Structure formats: structure tokens, C-alpha cells
């Protein structure tokens, strides 16, 4: 393969664990950036959430991909007034139907926009769950969140709704809107913990294709590293695709190499083996 010219990395479970980056990974990140090699994060998180984790790393000097590719931003993306390179929302009719179904089944989902998200009030729990998240708004019904505009995505967690609820919502969306949506499954330490619903063309691989079309990167010289099914499209399309050792088996089988887990500073391992050698 060609020499690595760009590093593309997932955030949660790859570069960061519980909002923290290990000292070893942070050092490797600094060395890569100091060598003049761009590091582009491709994450499920919103811009503001990703920015808070990466603050002070220098990653935001390069483009950033948020919401699994539905929101792509130019350099300086730590600021809300940065240049948007790409944005895609769900069809309004689709979003309305999904929110109404969630209300009918009493599911508690997160409705996500570029700079704001809405949470249905948690059962027997209050606003304390908002913690210090200044972009989150509590609503009584999921449908309230989309009264004025369509969202980019919906997210639903097993911790609150159970895996039976996740599967039911997944089946409803696939049966009703298979041609207009895509469903991303999210895992944590091998366990299925959430789903997100996006417009059909959204995934991390298509985000890299958009950046390639904009002459921001050359896919053949990209190293992409991730730890979940949602990372597969970018792992497979990149010149070098790396999976973390705690990734689902399908992800590891289709990667070019396996790195140690995030807790073992697998990002640093990959940088030392393929970028900083």
C-alpha cells in the first residue's frame, strides 16, 4: 500500500473511552499531527460533544465528520460557526412516522439535530440526566422535537428501552422506510447497546468519499481505525483498515489488521506500526 497521508479515526471505543484519551494515545496523536499528517475524527457524536473530548489536541485544525457522516465540517470545527462541507437530514414524513411510533410504544429516544438534541423525559427520572449537556432539551413526547424541522437522526438505547424495544423499532423502520433510511447498530464491549436511524445514504464510508471528492484526502493513502459495525464502511474503503481487538468478529475479519483495545492504547499501537514507523 501507499504511505499513509491521512489518519481517520472513530472516537468512542477507539481514540477515547468514557470521554477520556489515554496519555499514550494523546502522545501518539500529537506526534502524528506534528509530522504534518491530518487526523480526521469520524464519530456518531454531535460537533459540540466531539469537540469537548478533543479539546486541546489540534485535531480540529483539520475537517471533522460528525453524526456518522450526516454532518461534515471544515477546519476549525470546534466552533459552531465553522464552514459546513455537507449536511443531510431525514425526510420529514419519515421522521414524523418514527417519532409517532416511538410515542405509541412509549419508547424514549433521542432526536438529534446539528447543534441540539431532544430527550423524552425518562420514566421516574428527572432533568438530572441532562448533567451539564447544554444542547439537550427535555420533551414530554418524541413528536414534540420535530414540530418545526426534520432531524438528522434518531438514537435509541437498550439501557432504557431494552433490546426487545431496539429490535421492534429496527423492524418498524426497516419495514416502513427501508429505501429512505439506514440503521446503524452500536455495540459496547461486544454488547448491542443502541441503534441510530439516518437517511439511507449516510455512513462513515460515504463520508470519506465526500472528503475524497473535495480533494481533502486520497482514499488509498488513508488509515482508518474503528471498533464497531458502523466503522466497517470506512475500514473497508480506506487503503489500510484497522479494527480494535474488542470489535465484533465481523469487523475484525474484514479489517487489514487488529490493534489492541482502546483501554490498551490501540490507537497509539496503530500509529507506531503504520504511520510513525
Image (spheres, rainbow, N blue to C red):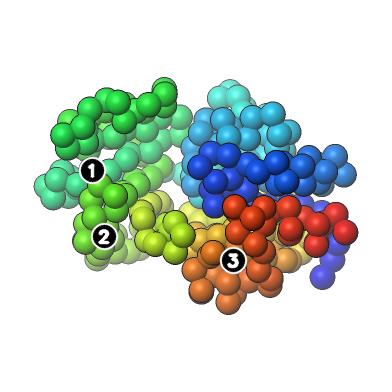
Q: Going from the N terminus, do you reach mark 2 or mark 3 first?
A: 2
Give me the residue at 43% from left, 59% from top.
187
Residue 65 spot, x, y in % from top left: 59, 44
* Element at label 1: loop
User: Which residue is identified by label 1?
Assistant: 108
Q: Which mark is residue 245?
A: 3
Answer left or right for 275 relative to 99: right
Q: Which mark is residue 163?
A: 2
Using the rendered image of the protein, determine whether residue 205 is visible from the camera's viewpoint. no
Answer left or right for 261 relative to 111: right
Give me the residue at 40% from left, 42% from top.
152
Q: Nearer the viewer, mark 3 or mark 1?
A: 3
* Gap in angstroms between the C-alphas marked 3 and 1: 32 Å
User: 202 above or below 140?
Assistant: below
* Element at label 3: loop
Q: Are marks 3 and 1 in contact (CB under 8 Å)?
A: no
Q: Nearer the viewer, mark 1 or mark 2?
A: 2
Amino acid at each position: 500500500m501507499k504511505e499513509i497521508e491521512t489518519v481517520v479515526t472513530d472516537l468512542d471505543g477507539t481514540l477515547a473511552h468514557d470521554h477520556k484519551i489515554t496519555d499514550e494515545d494523546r502522545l501518539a496523536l500529537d506526534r502524528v499531527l506534528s509530522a504534518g499528517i491530518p487526523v480526521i475524527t469520524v464519530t456518531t457524536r454531535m460537533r459540540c460533544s466531539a469537540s469537548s473530548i478533543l479539546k486541546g489536541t489540534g485535531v480540529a485544525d483539520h475537517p471533522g465528520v460528525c453524526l456518522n457522516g450526516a454532518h461534515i465540517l471544515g477546519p476549525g470545527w470546534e466552533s459552531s460557526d465553522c464552514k459546513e462541507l455537507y449536511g443531510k437530514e431525514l425526510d420529514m414524513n419519515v421522521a414524523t412516522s418514527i417519532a409517532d411510533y416511538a410515542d405509541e410504544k412509549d419508547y424514549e429516544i433521542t432526536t438529534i439535530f446539528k447543534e441540539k438534541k431532544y430527550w423524552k423525559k425518562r420514566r421516574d427520572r428527572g432533568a438530572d440526566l441532562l448533567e451539564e449537556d447544554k444542547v439537550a432539551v427535555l420533551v414530554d413526547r418524541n413528536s414534540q422535537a420535530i414540530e418545526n424541522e426534520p432531524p438528522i437522526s434518531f438514537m435509541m438505547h437498550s439501557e432504557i428501552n431494552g433490546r426487545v424495544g431496539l429490535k421492534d423499532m429496527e423492524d418498524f423502520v426497516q419495514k416502513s422506510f427501508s429505501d429512505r433510511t439506514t440503521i446503524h447498530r452500536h455495540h459496547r464491549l461486544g454488547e448491542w447497546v443502541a441503534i441510530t436511524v439516518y437517511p439511507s445514504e449516510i455512513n462513515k464510508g460515504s463520508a470519506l468519499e465526500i472528503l475524497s471528492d473535495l480533494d481533502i484526502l486520497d482514499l488509498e493513502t488513508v488509515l482508518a481505525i474503528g471498533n464497531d459495525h458502523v466503522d466497517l464502511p470506512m475500514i473497508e474503503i480506506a487503503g489500510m483498515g484497522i479494527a480494535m481487538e474488542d470489535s465484533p468478529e465481523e469487523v475484525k475479519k474484514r479489517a487489514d489488521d487488529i490493534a489492541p483495545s482502546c483501554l490498551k492504547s490501540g490507537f497509539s499501537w496503530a500509529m507506531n506500526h503504520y504511520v510513525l514507523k
